[in-house]
Amino acid sequence: MSTNPSTDMLPLLGDVVTSPLGAARVVILPIPYEATTTYRKGCENGPAALLDASQQVEYYDEELEQEFWQVGIYTHEPVADTRDRPYTPEEMLQVTEETVSNLIAGGKFVIGLGGEHSITTGIVEAYRKIHNDPFTVVQIDAHGDLRHEYEGSIHNHACVMRRIVDMGLPTVQIGIRSICREEADLIKDKQLPVFRAREIAMQPNWMERALAAIQTEKVFFTIDLDGIDPTLIPGVGTPEPGGLNWYSLTTFIRRVFETHDVIGCDVMELAPIQDSVVSEFTAAKLVYKLIGYQAIAKGW
């Protein structure tokens, strides 16, 4: 991605593969916002850590047998950066929505990097206002995030999928293994399609069932990294035992890109661990996978 004015926000994959905004098909948007996390803090440092680690990712994808940096990757300057100053949820959502709207209006494939999961509301709202066709939000996550409010805020990170349901958008939830009673009741009342981690571990056909649950051609992916087994990515705010392994995760994501029109993605809640790089490196490799799957799907 591009040269970035923020000294700690490094280009994805290094300067050698940066593209100017006008020439880039893919824009990486760092959103280092953290205000409502309740367990491990530090996800505001996630985007910088991921971008730093990305410079160690091989350009050649051994699964797809190609290099994808040539598609044009631009790293946007950070928005709603709580390392600089506090942001209210409303300020964060406004600047996020405006920035994403401008990028997708310019034909860019946007991958948002958080930051806490509440950011996704602003990203999805931008897509909802621009896309006339309906789309499904496919969520990979350990948690339902379906509370109406939490700790006095409807924009808490534990409420993001409730806000998306309230928008009238269909959802499919993958890897869920922690919900409260309010969320369990909502899932039953609205018959929301949820594929729980324990079912995924025991049911070989879960992937076909999950793909069949996506009822629209267009898809937006929101990936909370705690949806992945914490033995692979321990650097998250609220690690939960179980979760997707690397190959279940990437196989499912690839299948969605092959069978649907993925309009955008985000990768949220990376909270780096001191003296360990495994979480940010794995997250960076996942972002490069998203770029590769989109490039194959679009024939870039």
Image (cartoon, helix red, strand yellow):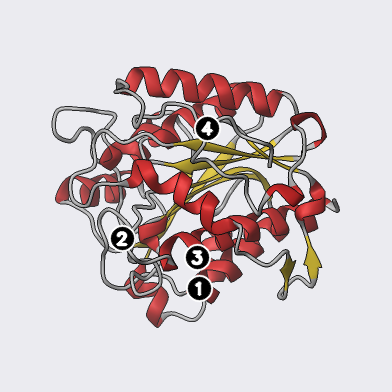
Of badges 2 and 1, the one in the foreground is: 2
Give the residue type that dot 3 points to: Thr
| Left or right placement of residue 171 versus residue 157 in this view | right
Q: Which residue carries the number 1 mark?
A: 246
Q: Which residue carries the number 2 mark?
A: 274
Q: Which residue is drawn at 79% across and 63% down?
A: 67
Q: How crowded is mark 1: few (under 14 residues within 10 Å), some or many (20 or more)?
A: some
Q: In which quarter of the image is residue 66?
A: bottom right
CA gap between label 2 and label 4 equals 22 Å
Q: Which residue is drawn at 82% across and 35% down?
A: 23
Q: Position of residue 199 (x, y in %)?
A: 36, 74
CA gap between label 1 and label 4 equals 31 Å
Q: Which residue carries the number 4 mark?
A: 6
Give the residue type that dot 4 points to: Ser
Q: Quadrant of residue 162?
A: top left
Decide which of 223, 16 is in the foreground and name it: 16
CA gap between label 2 and label 1 equals 23 Å
Q: Residues within 10 Å of mark 2 (few under 14, many from 20)?
A: few
| Left or right placement of residue 143 versus residue 65 in this view | left
Q: Which of marks 2 and 3 is nearer the N terminus?
A: 2
Q: Which residue carries the number 3 mark?
A: 282
- Where 182 falls versus 296 (above or below)? above
Callout 2–callout 4 Cβ contact below 8 Å? no
Q: How crowded is mark 3: few (under 14 residues within 10 Å), some or many (20 or more)?
A: some
Secondary structure of the residue carrying numbered label 3:
helix
Give the residue type that dot 1 points to: Trp
Of badges 2 and 3, the one in the foreground is: 2
Secondary structure of the residue carrying numbered label 4:
loop
